[in-house]
Amino acid sequence: MKIKPLTKEQLIISTDRLTRFKETESKYLRVFKDIILNNLIEPKFKKSDLDDMEYEKLKDLAQDIINSSLDEKFEDSLINQRLFDYENSIFKLDENTKKLLKNKINYKAIIKLLPEDIPLNLQYLKALNKGNPTEEREKEAFCFPVEKVILCEGITEETLLPEFAKLCGYDFNKHGIYVVSAGGKNQVVKYFYNFADSLKIPVFVLLDKDAGENFNEIKPKLRKFDKIHLLKSGEFEDLLPDSLIIKTLNYETQNISLTSIESLNDYSSKVEFLEEFFKHRGLHDFKKAEFAHAVKNNINSPDDISEEISEIIKEIKGTKVPF
């Protein structure tokens, strides 16, 4: 076998992709096939060859290319076994997919290549070479191993729910709570159907008030340990206390144009108010993602949590792991 060794950057990127919270079979096939197509010189395979190839052979080729790109020999399978146990504990895996996981990739050598500033999944990978993974997660707050999934509509919930939870004394990253933003209520249904079929762990679904039809589509597929919450009014931005919105706007505009709570209450929704606020003060267009990050930076008091947000955090906390 003749190969073009993976660079340090390629090794880190491939390892990152293999350890993300993604469906096991698809992420392993994607990474392994990419490595074989780009780094195996002889024998040469086409993509169609790899699509027809047995998983065992795919795994062997990919792991050999990875390990040949490293200076150290494979000696310790602790990390590999822990990755297998983790993926098998959260996803429903068939025997073929398990073959992909039963590899001898030299993760111990790859860990030595990782820089200091790395995503949470790679922090978890480093911890697999230490003590109990769950205890390490609770100590270092890197979210993995994931134990529950929160499935929401948009970026506002994804950004702010972890911050509100911290204020309630419940750190998502310490407890393995992974937030997925689907990008709309219809996408939430698609995501949930896939999760219900592929995941072994609980899913907490959060929907805006106008998603009643989607709520009814999801409800029959809920497993006994899943939970769904339909907002009592509007969308997630409507749950933000007026004082938190005013505090954020005043901070962002450096108090040039103070905003009154009274004017906020004149609008049917807080998003409508925010769109008008940004428009009439000559600011850039209102963008939910940017505003969510601004709000995040201003959450610092129990008064910043509304009653329903507090209720949602309690429901998430109470969602039990089924094992």
Image: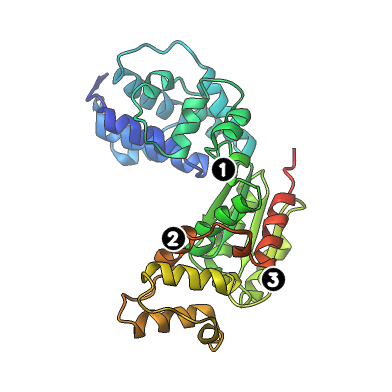
Task: Compute the Cα span from label 2 to label 3.
Answer: 31 Å
Of helix, strand and loop, which one carries label 2? Answer: helix
Is residue 281 shown above or below 8?
below
The numbered mark at residue 173 is 1
Q: Are marks 2 and 3 in contact (CB under 8 Å)?
A: no
Look at the numbered disc 3 and give the secondary structure of its residue.
helix
- Across and down, in percent, residue 99 comes to 52, 28
Pointer 3 residue = 216
Q: How far apart are the alpha carbons under marks 2 and 1?
A: 18 Å
Amino acid type for the residue under numbered disc 3: Asn
> Does label 2 or label 3 sit earlier along the sequence?
3
How far across and down, in percent of the image, does residue 91 sit?
60, 40
Nearest the viewer among 309 and 68 is 309
User: Which residue occupies 34% across, 82% down?
Assistant: 281
Q: Position of residue 35 (x, y in %)?
A: 32, 33
Above or below, comparing residue 311 to residue 134 in the picture: below
Q: Which labelled disc corresponds to residue 249?
A: none
Q: Position of residue 262 (x, y in %)?
A: 55, 86
**Residues at marks 1 and 3, CA–CA distance in whole angstroms:** 30 Å
